[in-house]
Image: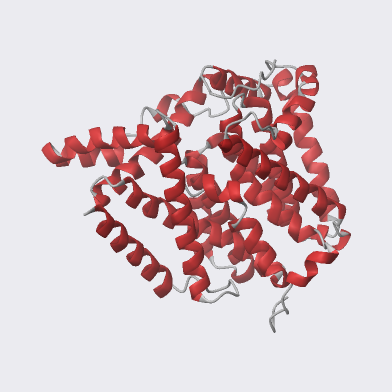
């Protein structure tokens, strides 16, 4: 019965994408859109298979088991279940200050609740089939990723195929951001936020402001510390996008933000550095298979500077390629080297004229900031590979947009008539 349920929902999802004209604004035929979606579903199924067979315990099975427990209440007390599913979000009234260290657990747990509640809905529709749930999660993940692609395509349609590759085909991104993890939510909501911003800039229609606010709210509740890094840069993009020397202003704002990050705790109750330190300690409490001997951070500027080389090494070069490592780590190491080489190549051919589009700078500064956050806080190599994948899907296309690599120009397409 399970294969028939899977096929039914896959056909239904493809039909929705087809009749919703998902290809609009992509420069792609609808069959390409359906192919990309089916590819993500297939990658999600592979990710699920690997997790279920390689790991005794994992997040996916944990959420699934919790979902099954909740659904037992649904079969006996459906009204109580619906009230709890819709309205039980914990005690929000005592956790208004999301920058306080003591409230970090509540806001992190809120993202877990969002993920779990969606898993419950998916299990209800799929009759508990995890492989069918892959479709439910990826229809949201894919739409957000497609909208992100549309933003890049809107400003540089000639690089269509390079954007397709850098957003949809980097192995680590495909594998991790297609599985039943919160990483897909984050990437999707960032993509939707950027898309609705672009649509508002083009049309000045208020419905896009409403959709933008909703997307930002979902990003906040799914992973609030990602939102804390994203929103100031996002706001800066909006404020400076029409200024004559916008790239210089944006860079100056980022430097100022860094200064505030290291000094805010000295003259206000807010301590941004303490959030990073607390997050690292939270990860230290979780046992992992591939500990990297990450040094302990302290709530001081000196500690962050001393640990910067280690953070960069972890995020850009780990895991190392070694024949002694299991196959999964060797594959991850090859992907890491590929992405690192791609970053270096694209950096060598950045063109100054492309720096005037602040969207690219915003994405790059944000992705690099999150790279460093991950490098500082995550001590486990396997978790590091997973968490950085969603930001690789942002960093690489942004670098593609900024650069003009001579031998990649063969993949450019003719600019459609009427495009800017």
- On the rendered image, what quadrant is the N terminus found in? bottom left
Residue 113 visible to an observer of this rendering: yes
Residue drawn 85% across the image and 60% down it = 244
Residue 243 appears at what percent x and percent y?
Answer: 80, 58
Q: Nearer the viewer, residue 19 or 193?
A: 19
Task: Specify whether 364 is left or right of 2.
Answer: right
Residue 210 visible to an observer of this rendering: no
Residue drawn 52% across the image and 17% down it = 285
Q: Quadrant of residue 12?
A: bottom left
Residue drawn 41% across the image and 30% down it = 92
Residue 180 appears at what percent x and percent y?
Answer: 43, 44
Q: Quadrant of residue 367?
A: top right
Task: Specify whether 297 is left or right of 408.
Answer: left
- On the rendered image, what quadrant is the C terminus found in? bottom right
Residue drawn 24% across the image and 32% down it = 69
Residue 105 appears at what percent x and percent y?
Answer: 48, 24
């Amino acid at each position: 019965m399970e294969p028939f349920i899977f096929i039914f929902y896959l056909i239904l999802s493809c039909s929705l994408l087809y009749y919703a004209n998902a290809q609009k604004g992509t420069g792609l035929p609808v069959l390409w859109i359906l192919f990309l979606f089916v590819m993500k579903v297939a990658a999600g199924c592979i990710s699920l298979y690997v997790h279920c067979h390689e790991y005794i315990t994992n997040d996916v099975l944990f959420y699934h088991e919790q979902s099954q427990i909740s659904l037992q209440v649904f079969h006996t007390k459906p009204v109580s279940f619906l009230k709890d599913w819709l309205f039980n979000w914990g005690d929000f009234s005592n956790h208004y200050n999301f920058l306080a260290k003591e409230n970090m657990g509540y806001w992190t747990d809120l993202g877990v609740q969002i993920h779990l509640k969606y898993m419950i809905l998916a299990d209800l529709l799929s009759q508990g089939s995890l492989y069918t749930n892959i479709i439910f999660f990826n229809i949201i993940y894919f739409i957000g990723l497609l909208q992100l692609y549309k933003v890049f395509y809107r400003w540089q349609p000639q690089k269509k195929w390079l954007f397709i590759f850098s957003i949809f085909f980097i192995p680590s991104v495909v594998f991790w951001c297609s599985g039943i993890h919160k990483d897909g939510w984050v990437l999707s909501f960032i993509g939707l936020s950027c898309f609705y911003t672009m649509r508002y800039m083009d049309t000045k229609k208020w419905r896009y402001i409403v959709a933008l606010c909703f997307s930002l709210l979902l990003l906040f509740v799914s992973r609030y510390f990602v939102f804390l890094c994203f929103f100031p840069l996002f706001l800066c993009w909006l404020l400076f996008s029409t200024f004559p020397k916008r790239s210089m202003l944006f860079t100056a704002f980022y430097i100022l933000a860094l200064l505030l990050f290291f000094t805010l705790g000295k003259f206000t109750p807010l301590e941004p550095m303490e959030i990073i330190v607390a997050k690292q300690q939270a990860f230290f409490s979780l046992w992992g298979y591939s500990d990297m001997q990450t040094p302990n951070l302290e709530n001081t500027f000196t500690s962050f500077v001393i640990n910067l080389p280690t953070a960069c090494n972890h995020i850009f070069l780990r895991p190392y390629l070694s024949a002694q490592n299991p196959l999964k780590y060797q594959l991850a190491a090859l992907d890491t080297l590929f992405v690192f080489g791609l970053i270096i190549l694209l950096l060598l051919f950045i063109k100054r004229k492309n720096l005037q589009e602040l969207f690219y700078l915003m994405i790059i500064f944000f992705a690099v900031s999150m790279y460093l956050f991950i490098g500082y806080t995550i001590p486990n190599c396997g978790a590091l590979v997973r968490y950085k994948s969603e930001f690789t899907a942002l960093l690489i296309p942004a670098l593609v947009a900024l650069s003009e690599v001579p031998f990649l120009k063969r993949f450019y397409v003719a600019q459609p008539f009427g495009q800017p």
